[in-house]
Every structure is written in structure tokens, then in C-alpha cells.
């Protein structure tokens, strides 16, 4: 019997996990610099934008405090966060602004190939 194609939700979850692992491998909060505590993967342009959801240019490693808990966190003050992002990651800022309105081609295999290539590069460089 031929192998069944994985369900869309399974592919989304797999891509989310790989992207999260890649981003969190940075090992510190890109905003405050903390390396201890819980690290999160934050999407500059929200997860509903599938064209950017798994692009590393749209993802940032931040601590729990900068993500949701401290005053002035990225969710409470998104305008300030975008200013910070533009100043600190100008190439990524330009990229996501250029790509944000492009309609996604719905190719999960391409997404997983991109993420697995990035993960492989990370492992070769770090481990």
C-alpha cells in the first residue's frame, strides 16, 4: 500500500517546530541580551501570513519578558518593536516589507526543504 501524504496540520506543526528550534538556537534574547530563562520565537509579521511564517528574516529570538511579560514588550508596543527591528535588522526589515503582500504558493514541501537546509547549515556551523 502506498504511503499516505501527511496532513496539512502535520506539515505546519513540523515546519513550526523546525523554525522555532533554529531561532532559539541563537541562545539569547535579541532585544535585551538575556541568555538565561525561557526563549521564544517571535514573528515580526504574524503567523497568519504563510509567505513569511517560516522565513528566518521574519523571526526573532526573544526572552519571555520581552515577548509578553515586561512593560513595553513586543506585543504591548508593536510600533516601538518595529522601530527597533528596522534599526537592528535593516535587511530583514526590507525583506519582510517587500514580501509581506505576496500570496503564498502553498508548497509545504518547499518550506520544509528550506528549513531543513537552514537547520543543516546551523548544525554544521555550531555542532
Image (cartoon, rainbow, N blue to C red):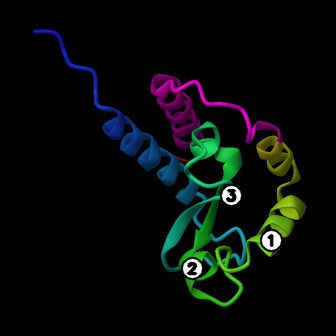
Mark seen at residue 22: none
Label 3 or label 1, whichever lies nearer to me, is: 1
105 drawn magenta: yes
The N terminus: image quadrant? top left
Q: Which of 38 and 43 is in front in this view?
A: 43
Residue farthest along the top direction in this orientation: 1
Q: Could you say whether the residue bearing mark 3 is in a helix, strand or loop?
A: loop
Q: Residue at x 66, y 31 (%)?
A: 103
Question: Looking at the picture, does residue 40 appear above or below residue 3?
Answer: below
Q: Could you say whether the residue bearing mark 1 is in a helix, strand or loop?
A: helix
* Residue 37 place in picture, x, y as percent: 50, 80
101 drawn magenta: yes
Give, as a single range, the part of the protein colored magenta: 98-125
Q: Name the residue under label 1.
A: 79
Q: Is residue 28 left or right of residue 20?
A: right
Q: Name the residue under label 2.
A: 68
Q: Which residue is drawn at 47% across and 31% down?
A: 112
Q: Mark 3 points at which residue?
A: 44
Q: Could you say whether the residue bearing mark 2 is in a helix, strand or loop?
A: helix
* Residue 111 place in picture, x, y as percent: 52, 31
Amino acid at each position: 500500500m502506498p504511503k499516505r501524504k501527511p496532513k496539512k496540520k502535520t506539515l505546519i506543526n513540523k515546519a513550526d517546530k523546525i523554525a522555532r528550534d533554529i531561532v532559539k538556537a541563537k541562545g539569547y534574547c535579541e532585544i535585551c541580551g538575556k541568555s538565561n530563562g525561557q526563549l521564544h520565537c517571535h514573528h515580526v509579521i504574524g503567523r497568519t501570513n504563510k509567505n513569511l511564517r517560516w522565513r528566518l528574516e521574519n523571526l526573532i529570538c526573544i526572552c519571555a519578558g520581552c515577548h509578553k511579560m515586561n512593560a513595553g514588550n513586543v506585543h504591548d508596543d508593536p510600533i516601538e518593536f518595529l522601530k527597533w527591528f528596522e534599526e537592528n535588522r535593516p535587511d530583514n526589515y526590507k525583506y519582510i516589507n517587500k514580501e509581506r503582500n505576496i500570496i503564498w504558493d502553498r508548497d509545504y514541501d518547499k518550506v520544509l526543504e528550506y528549513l531543513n537546509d537552514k537547520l543543516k547549515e546551523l548544525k554544521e556551523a555550531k555542532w
